[in-house]
Amino acid sequence: MDHHDVKNFDTIRKNSLIGLGDVVVDVGACQGVYTQLFHELLGATGKIYCIELMPHMFSFLEMRFGHMTNIDFINAAVSDGVGTESIYGGDSDETFNILGGGGVKVGEAKSTTLDNLLKDEKEIALIKIDVEGAELKVLRGMKDVIKRTNNILIEVHYDEVWPEIRKILIEDNGLSCYNIETEEKVTMESPRPYQCICGR
């Protein structure tokens, strides 16, 4: 857990973004730092979707949290379509991705969209998105779900996709977004924040 996670955790707790019985989604769960936080806030209530691209990390998550009955484990790439995506290697477990970015292709994964995965959920308290640059693909695949989601915690990696991400969040869906690092409101003119929280 790095200092960004600490600030994110403080933001989630301070603003009471998750309560007992809520549905929450961890997109890019990796080692399960956020899944653990969600479990602490929900206990045995509600539902946690724990989604991880890499099979070895997915197995670790199942071993770590498999005894918790309110967690759904999904080994897939969350993207803008249902099918398959190439997986590219990174410098660490945290940096495997579906975009490439100079990394070597290491395999393929089934892909899904949040609209497909969460079609039966009437309301989602929070979706956390940390997908090493593929966040725009995730947002493009959740056009319906975003309307039923109260909060989105998103990590944005590239300047070139920020204008479209900003438009989807603020202009298209009317969310209020805040740069977690600077604690400033994000507007349609704001530069890319590394991490921001957007809510209704």
Image (tube, rainbow, N blue to C red):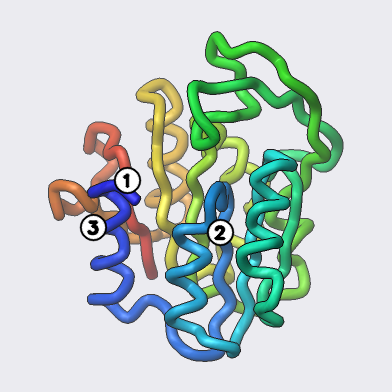
Task: Decide: is 155 above or below 33.
Answer: above
Identify which amino acid the numbered label 3 is placed on: Lys
The image position of residue 55, as x and y in percent, is: 74, 42
Answer few, some or many: residues within 10 Å of disc 1's Cα (few below 14, many 20 plus, some between 14 and 19).
many
The image position of residue 197, as x and y in percent, is: 34, 57
What residue is shown with label 1?
Answer: 195
- Whether residue 135 sits left or right of residue 195 in the image: it is right
* Viewer-side label of 2, 1: 2
To which quarter of the image does residue 161 belong?
top left
Identify which amino acid the numbered label 1 is placed on: Gln
To which quarter of the image does residue 63 belong?
bottom right
User: Circle 2 — which element?
Assistant: strand
What residue is shown with label 3?
Answer: 7
Answer few, some or many: residues within 10 Å of disc 2's Cα (few below 14, many 20 plus, some between 14 and 19).
many
Alpha-carbon span between mark 2 and mark 3: 17 Å
* Marks 1 & 3, CB-CB < 8 Å contact: yes
Q: Say the numbered circle drawn on residue 26.
A: 2
The image position of residue 6, as x and y in percent, is: 26, 58
To which quarter of the image does residue 82 belong?
top right
Of the image marks 2 and 1, the number of the one nearer the N terminus: 2
Task: Decide: is 78 above or below 98.
Answer: below
